[in-house]
Image: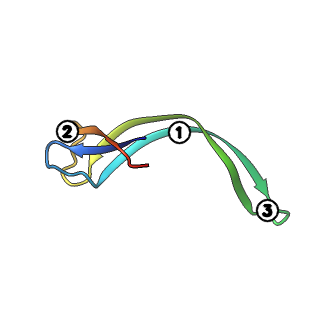
Amino acid sequence: MTNLRYRCENCGNVTRFDVTRTQTTKSFYHYSLGGELSIEGQEILADEVSEVSCRWCSSSKSVVEVYEESED
C-alpha cells in the first residue's frame, strides 16, 4: 500500500500542513427517539484537495506530494 505525505520544499517541513478539501459523502443518519444523531456507514463518493499550505512558512506553492510504501 502507498501512503501520501506532504513535504515543503521551501522550509523542509514534513509534519504540519493546512489542507483544504471538499468531500461528497453518503451517510446513514440514525436519530434516537430523543433526537440524538448518530451517523453510521459513511461512504466517500468524491474527495478533492484544493490547496495544501505549509504551517511553518505559509507557502502553498512549495508543498509537494510524497508517496511512501507502507509495511502492511
Q: Earlier in the sequence, mark 3 or mark 1?
A: 1
**Quick one: which residue is furthest to the bottom in this view?**
34
Q: Secondary structure at mark 3?
A: loop
* Quadrant of the frame with the N terminus: top left
The image's mark for residue 23 is 1
Q: What amino acid does circle 1 point to?
A: Gln
Q: Secondary structure at mark 2?
A: loop
x%, y% of residue 8? 20, 44
In this rendered view, identify the residue nearer to me: 37 or 11: 11
Q: What amino acid does circle 3 point to?
A: Gly
Say which quarter of the image contains residue 4: top left
Mark 3 touching mark 2, by CB under 8 A?
no
| C-alpha separation, residue under disc 2 versus residue under disc 1 | 24 Å
x%, y% of residue 43? 63, 41
Disc 1: CA contacts within 10 A as few (<14), some (14-19) or many (>=20): few
Q: How many marks?
A: 3
Disc 2: CA contacts within 10 A as few (<14), some (14-19) or many (>=20): some
| C-alpha separation, residue under disc 3 versus residue under disc 1 | 26 Å
* Residue occupied by mark 2: 62
- In the depicted structure, whether residue 13 falls above or below residue 23: below
Say which quarter of the image contains residue 33: bottom right
Q: Is residue 53 left or right of residue 1?
A: left
In this rendered view, identify the residue nearer to me: 5 or 31: 5
* Residue occupied by mark 3: 35
Q: Residue at x 73, y 47 (%)?
A: 28
Q: Is residue 6 left or right of residue 8?
A: right
**Quick one: which residue is furthest to the right in this view?**
33
x%, y% of residue 51? 34, 38
